[in-house]
Amino acid sequence: MGVLLLRLFSLAGRPGQISRVASILFLASFLAACASRPVGVLVPSGTAGGASEVDLLVATTRAPSTEPGVLFSGERSDELSLTEIVVSIPPGKNREVGQVQWPKKLPANPEREFSTVSVTPLKGKDDAQSWLKGNLPKSRRVLIFVHGFNNRYEDAVYRYAQIVHDSGTDVAPVIFTWPSRASVFDYNYDKESTNYSRDALEDLLRRASRDPKVGEITVMAHSMGSWVTVEALRQMAIRDGRIAPKITDVILASPDLDVDVFGKQIQAMGKARPKFTLFVSRDDRALNLSRRISGNIDRLGQIDPTVEPYRTQLEQAGITVLDLTALKGGDKLNHGKFAESPEVVQLLGNRLIAGQTVTDSDVGLGERVGAVALGTAQTVGSAASIAVSTPIMIFDPRTRANYGNQVRRLGQSVENTVGSTVAP
């Protein structure tokens, strides 16, 4: 806390830096407000009729906590701990897709709130394999999720349970949670905790990929969790000469990554790397703050994929980008759109987590998603269809080519329409 406070005071003493201080104080006050919910929600509270249950394997480098229902703190452990946690999701009539209904008090009310059904510590590889055998679907696909900055253990668990449930994806859900102190004043501690945890994540990925029962693995990371994810994959490529072939897809949502560093990390992975998909949003306030305290270098989750040099670099690297800038966020920071938007979580489940492309035939799915979201029925390929490519714009090699061709055919007036539609 002291380090960031000194930073605040130093910024306040410089002309033209008041807005930075205001941004940090805004973020601090917003996150403090979110911390008012009960602590210890992982004490089992049961389930209810009509509720759904999500069975998670939770791997963590956090140190154990002595507080009941907290399980693991924000401090670091020398060992990786494994726990099976079953989370109850309220009946659909009592909740909105994309939202975590946190208990207002304990014990939770499973009819209207997320609730913990059971917590089972796992001892070693044999228990983990038993869990996998019981939870691996016919697709034999595993989804490993890595949370972001300012997350308690229970934050990560409940958020991931929500993503798994709302996306409807057919996977064995695993979450890797690293030591975060869940404080805006501990940004640097959290960042170093990701570095501390990258070997453990690399080992987890390697073990999962070597299990003969596993078919394919998708890795999804949010915010600062993107750093430990990309670092673990880079290390694997250097150590083993390649990334394990079973790791087919990597999804980075609002990645808090220096764009220059990411370019080097991708190069180190070699050509036989997984397919990367990015969720970006230029109105992400959390990443705007990160940019300001990180040397004013663009963060990967904030880039505009339509402008250079990013357009060409992304196309050459074969990276798909979903631009959520025009999508209304569920939080004031616009940092969690990937999990809170019904359109996006359904896209995750129907396409990305399943390892499919996000385009069909010769038409970019971005145009279709936009048309559905806005309630339109224009013919794809018309001027209107380009203009309604919001709120979700998708840029992969096929969509980029089609989008450019349509704009050229329909003239500069349409191009101006598109620009005004997707402007932040």
Image (cartoon, grey):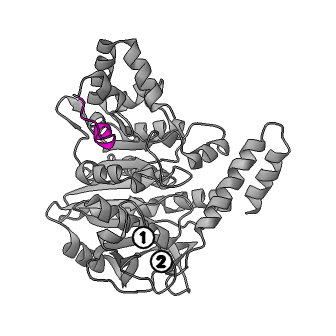
- What's the mark number on residue 361? none
Question: With respect to residue 5, does 306 lie above or below?
Answer: above
Give 125 or 323, whichever is nearer the viewer. Answer: 323
Residue at horizontal 29 percent and vertical 80 percent from the top? 127
Q: Is residue 277 magenta?
A: no
* Residue wearing tag 2: 103
Residue 310: in sight, yes or no? no
Which amino acid lies under the numbered mark 2 shown in the image of this protein? Pro
Q: Nearer the viewer, mark 1 or mark 2?
A: 2
Question: With respect to residue 59, does 149 lie above or below?
Answer: above
Question: With respect to residue 401, does 391 lie above or below?
Answer: below
How many other residues sit within 10 Å of disc 2, few (<14), some (14-19) or many (≥20)? Answer: some
- Image coords of residue 275 (percent x, y): 30, 42
* Residue wearing tag 1: 157
Question: With respect to residue 77, does 195 lie above or below?
Answer: above
Q: Earlier in the sequence, mark 1 or mark 2?
A: 2
- Image coords of residue 254 (percent x, y): 47, 47
Left/right of residue 27 with respect to residue 203 in the rendered view: right
Label 2: element kind: loop
Give 105 or 77, whichever is nearer the viewer. Answer: 105
Q: Which residues are magenta?
A: 369-378
